[in-house]
Image (cartoon, rainbow, N blue to C red):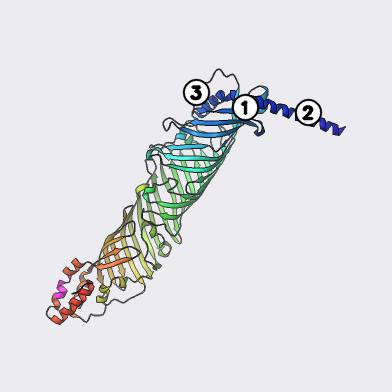
Amino acid sequence: MAKKLVIIGASILGLLVVTVLGLALFLDANQFRPTLEDTMSRALGRRVTISKISVAPFSGGIAIEGLTIADDPAFSREPFLRAKAVTAGVDLMPLILSRSLRVESFRLEKPEVVLLRSAAGSWNVSSLAATSPHSSDSSVATSVTVFVQTIKISNGRIVVANVAKDRVEHIYDDVNLEVSNVSYTSPIVFHATAKTPGGGSADLDGQAGPFNRQDATATPLHAQASFKHLDAAATGFVDEASGIRGVIDFAGELTSDGTLMTTKGKATATHVQLLPGGAPAGVPVVVDYGSSYNSRTQRGTLTQGEVHVGAADARLTGNYDASGKSTVLRMRLVGQKMAVTALEAVPPAVGVTLPAGAALTQGTMDTDLAIGGPLDHLVITGPLGISNATLTGFDLTGKLGALASFAGLPKTSDTVIETLAARLRVAPEGVTADALDLTVPTIGTLTGAGTISPNGAMDFKMLAKLRRGPAPAVTGVAAVVSFSQKEGIPFRIGGTTSKPAVAPDLGSVATNVKSGLAAAAKNPDTLEKAGQALGSLFNRKK
């Protein structure tokens, strides 16, 4: 008897299922299309259009084809969102029995969303869900209720563009979003992931709401954020023409009350480059980071900026303004007693490369740099000082050539730098060093100024006051050396930072050594030897 009851029950259940599926298959769900379009248009404040609606009984809902949501007309006439296929979760029994449509969830497959930023800094998403009147189709008497509790987006694409910059597009692929507890009056829970331009990834997990219907971007938010291998240039954070490059990893949290957003976490930047002709730095820059940003004024303040490059530490302070076409920085970087061994891989970022085989093996650096201007033309200025440093694998005495020989300077395989001071200006057009003052115990004091182009080409005018070495045997040369120790010998540094070339400033030297030659003129033999020595100095015959 029990077995028969089970068979009868199963048969009745199967009959009910077949009946429901049959009714669902023959039901014309497309009759709900005008009303659903109107209902969604009212909810989103944007015109919503649907190509076709059909019943999808096996997925527990209806299938929507060709869904589009219009953009804010102030930004674009193209759709804000396109989705070829959408599954709406509905309660099938009211749909079948009373032809009443109750929508409870949406799942969008491979949608494309276009986010646009205006010259004033506002976004097209701001007006989404704002109350906007749309006419209803009174000819449709079917009941439609939209009570969405979950929204899912799978394999989506987000296109981000700035209309003030010729709408250069940055594509975020494989966007996945899951939103639950959807409500206008209470926080919603969300989790979002995406692939960022340049091969990175983003992950956000948190709560948002209550929803701000006047400005969607002013909705309160709290989220844990993780960005990996974020390419600063590819994502559009900086203008590619600026030459600024870098890959960023960030882990931290974001909190917003709708106007004031605070961010706190740790950012690690690798392959940093600051000039168009520079090369990626060979060491990562780590920043313990905190920021406070006002979305109304589009201005922010750096509340924490502890910068670490290996064992070298510095402090970054200041503020920024994102209200214009390009974000403007006003920052200050201060570092004291920083180990130069940790920093020697940083100079390539500004087009400066140490000579082949050379390395800084000891010493400290002090700096106080102002960082200002728009991101697409950033300028860094300020003093830099190095003390008690050793540059191994580079003989500066040998680079001075005959200048060193005349003064009897010893040959060395390394260069010991007692002090180096300069005032720097680093900009997209290159590096300028003024008030350069270098003291090398084995050589003397070298002073001057010059420039380094973005590709590393050097052009420096210098003056060498050589230390006193063994007295030269030739009287005329002794007079020249004596003059150089008192007044200095002008010379130039050319070539590149990786292969510098040192040569006397012939015009200046010819004028300055007259007094030395005059002392040797009374003795023709001595004058002859002095002329030969000077010919060697000028790299030409007497």
Secondary structure of residue under mark 1: strand
Q: Nearer the viewer, mark 1 or mark 2?
A: 2
Magenta stretch, residue numbers: 512-517
Q: Is residue 374 visible?
A: no
Q: In the image, what residue occupies the spot 32% across and 76% down?
A: 411
Q: Residues within 10 Å of mark 3 (few under 14, many from 20)?
A: some
Q: Position of residue 369 (x, y in %)?
A: 35, 55
Secondary structure of residue under mark 3: loop
Judge by depth and name the residue closer to the eye, 157 or 106: 157
Q: Is residue 121 left or right of residue 526?
A: right
Q: In the image, what residue occupies the spot 18% across and 77% down?
A: 530
Q: Is residue 296 above or below residue 440?
A: above
Secondary structure of residue under mark 2: helix
Q: Which residue is mark 2?
A: 12
377 inside magenta stretch: no
Q: Position of residue 46 (x, y in %)?
A: 49, 28
Q: Is residue 471 above or below residue 226?
A: below
Q: Is residue 22 left or right of residue 519?
A: right
The CA span between labels 1 and 3 is 20 Å
Judge by depth and name the residue closer to the eye, 454 or 328: 454
Q: Is residue 9 left or right of residue 517?
A: right
Q: Is residue 343 above or below residue 235?
A: below
Q: Identity of the amino acid at label 3?
A: His
**Which quarter shows the C terminus?**
bottom left
User: If you read the primary sequence from the N terminus, does the residue marked by circle 1 or circle 2 appear first?
Assistant: 2
Q: Residue reaching furthest right?
A: 1
Q: Which residue is mark 3?
A: 134
Q: Which residue is mark 1?
A: 102
Q: Nearer the viewer, mark 2 or mark 3?
A: 2
Q: Which mark is residue 441?
A: none
**Which quarter shows the N terminus?**
top right
